[in-house]
Image (cartoon, coloured by chain):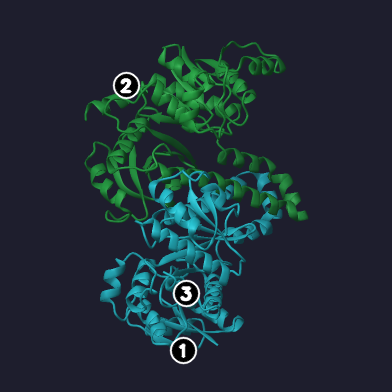
Chain colours: A green, B cyan
Amino acid sequence: MIRIALDAMGGDYAPEEMIKGALMANRELPVEVILVGKAEVLNETLKKLKLKLPFIPASETIAMDESPVQAVRQKKDSSINVAVSLVKEGKADAVVSAGNTGALMASAIFTLGIIKGVQRPAIATELPLPTGKVLLLDAGANVDCTSHFLMQFAEMGSLYAEHVFHIHHPRVGLLNIGEEKLKGNRLVRESYPLLKQSPINFIGNVESKEILSGAADVVVCDGFIGNLILKFAESLGEAVFNLLKSEFERALTAKLGWFFLASSFNKFKKTVTYDDYGAAPFLGIQGIVYKAHGRAHATAIKSAIRETAEAVKENLVGFISKMGENR
Amino acid sequence: MIRIALDAMGGDYAPEEMIKGALMANRELPVEVILVGKAEVLNETLKKLKLKLPFIPASETIAMDESPVQAVRQKKDSSINVAVSLVKEGKADAVVSAGNTGALMASAIFTLGIIKGVQRPAIATELPLPTGKVLLLDAGANVDCTSHFLMQFAEMGSLYAEHVFHIHHPRVGLLNIGEEKLKGNRLVRESYPLLKQSPINFIGNVESKEILSGAADVVVCDGFIGNLILKFAESLGEAVFNLLKSEFERALTAKLGWFFLASSFNKFKKTVTYDDYGAAPFLGIQGIVYKAHGRAHATAIKSAIRETAEAVKENLVGFISKMGENR
C-alpha cells in the first residue's frame, strides 16, 4: 500500500476539500492517505462531515502569501514541514500539498535535499490538451537560469514523461519565439546546442502558440517564463468562459439555447478546469513531493494523489538519480 | 487629409483583403490610403473586385518567413521598403503593413531611423479586454533587454496610452510573477526602481493573470516574454473556442441549443478575434509605422488604419521625441 502524506491545511478550500479528497483516494485508489494538520481544526471539520479519520497533528500553518523560506524556518511544526518530514522519516512514500508553493519547495530542499548531480530542482506542471497533456517546466522554482539548468530540466522532464506518463520517447521542445535554431534570447540560444547533445528526443524550438496544439510532450523554459505562461493560461481560460457565459445570458434566444446546452457547457467547463488533472511534481528533490493547485477541490486532490502514487510506483527519485549519476 | 501608405502585399489575405480594407477606410475615415504592391497582382485583383484604385508599384515582396534584415537589404523594391520610403519622402504620413514584422521593423530602422535618445524601438500590442484594452510592450522587437530599455518602454507606452488611447494618467505595470517589489528575475528586479523614479504613473508589478482583468493600462516586459504571451493568448483563445464548438456540435440537444445561440456565439467570436482592434505601433521610430495582424481581414485593416490616423493626428513622433530630449 502506497502511503501519501497530505497537507490538510494547504489550499483555498482546506481543510474540508482536502479531507474529502483523501477519503475519495482511500476508497478508490490503492493508497493510504495520511492527513496532516491542526488538531482542533481537523477534529471540527471531521465532526461536521460525520467522518472518522486519523491524522498527524501539526500545530502551525503557513499562509499562501507568507515569505516561503522564512515561514519554513520559523514554523518548524507547520503542516507542510510535518508532512514533508514524514517522507524523510520513511513514514510516508510521498507528500502532496495545495498550499504555499515556495514554502513547499523550501521545506523539500531543507528536509529532503536535492538529488546528487542535479543543479536545481524544477516544478513541472501539466497543462490539459484536447488530445492529452503537455508537461511544462520549470513552472516557477528558478527565475534566473543558465543553459545547463535548462538542459537538466529537459532531461528530468523527459524522464518524467517517459516513466510516469508512459510516453515512449517523449518529444522535448525548447520554448522559443520562432522555430529556427538561431531565434530567441541569449539563454535559449545557448541552451539549444546543449539540448541537441543530450540523450533526449529533442525536437527543437517550440513556439508558445504550439504548446496547446500538442507539438511537444515536454516544453522547457526558465521558471520566470513558465510561471507567467501558466498563470496567464488559467486567467485567459476563465476570461473566455465568463465572457461567453455573460453573452449567453443576455438575450432571450440565448437563454433558450442555454437550456439545451447546459450539459455540454458543463462538460466543457470540466475540460478547461483542472479537476481531472494531476499535480505538479518537484523534480530533482530527494523524495517525492507534489504541489496540487491552490484552488483544488476534492476531485482534483484525488487526481493529484493518483499521479503521486504512480510516481512512487515508478520510482521517481530512482530514475532522476540515474540522470544525476551520469554527470 | 491624412495619407496612409498600405503594404498591399503583406499578410495572409493579401492583396484582396488589403484592397477591401483600404476601400472601407477611404469611405469611412478622413484618410487617403495609398496602396503599394506588385502591379500585375494588384491589377488582377482590382479587376476581379471590379474596382479602380490607384497604387504605387513595388516589384518585389517579402514573404512572412524570410530573414528580415537580409530581405530588407536585398529587396530594395519590396512593397515594405517602398511603403516605408513614402513616409521618409513626405508622400505619406504613416505606413501600415500586415506582413513580415521583423522586415517592417528593419525597414523602419534603416529608412526612417530611431528617435534621438531612444535606446531601442519597441513593438506595442494592444490586447482586447471585456472592459477596454491593454497595451503590452515590448511584443517582440528586443529579445535581450536591459533595465534601461524597459524603463523607456514604460515611458513610451505611457505616452502612447495617454495621447492615442486618450487615457488620463495611464497605469503602467511591470510584468512579474508576484506583486512584491523583490519578486522576479534579475531584469525585472533591476527595472523596478527605474520605473519607480520615472515620470509615469507606475503602479508596481502586475502578474500575468491580471493582464486580462485590466489591472494596468500598459504592461511592460522584454520582447521575448511579450511575444510568447501574445502568441500564447491567440492560440489559447482559439483552442477554447474550438473545444467549445466541437462539444456543442456533438449532442442533439446541443444542436438545438446551437440554433438559438448562433448569434450570441458569433458576437462572442467577434470579441475574441481581433477585427475591431487596431494594430501595433513601432514606438521610438522616426516615423509612424504600424504592424497589422498577419491574419487581418478588411475590417481589421480598417481598424488598423483608424488607429494609425489617430497617431498621426496626435503627433506620435513628436511626443515620443520629447521623451528622448529629456535624457
Where residue B110 sits: x, y (%)?
32, 75
Q: Is residue B71 above or below residue A252?
A: below
Say which amino acid is labelled 1: Pro
Element assignment for label 3: helix
Q: Judge if badges 2 and 3 mark residues of a common chain.
A: no
Callout 2: chain: A
Q: Which is in the foreground here, disc 3 or disc 1?
A: 3
Query: Tag on residue B54?
Result: 1
Horizontal side, residue B105 vs residue A181: left or right:
right
- Dot 1 and dot 2 within a common chain: no
Tag 2: amino acid: Gly
Note whether residue A266 is visible.
yes
At mark 2, the secondary structure is: helix
The mark that comes first in sequence, 3 or 1, is 1
From the top left corner, tell me how far across and down residue B26 is, in percent. 56, 83
> Circles 2 and 3: CB distance less than 8 Å?
no
Mark 3 is surrounded, within 10 Å at the Cα level, by few (under 14), some (14 to 19) or many (20 or more) other residues, namely few
Task: For mark 3, name the chain.
Answer: B
Label 1, secondary structure: give it. loop
Location of mark 2 (residue) = A318
Q: Position of residue B156 (x, y in %)?
A: 48, 66
Quote the CA–CA distance across marks 3 and 1: 37 Å
- In the rendered view of the protein, which quadrant contains the C terminus of chain A? top left
Q: Which residue is mark 3?
A: B322
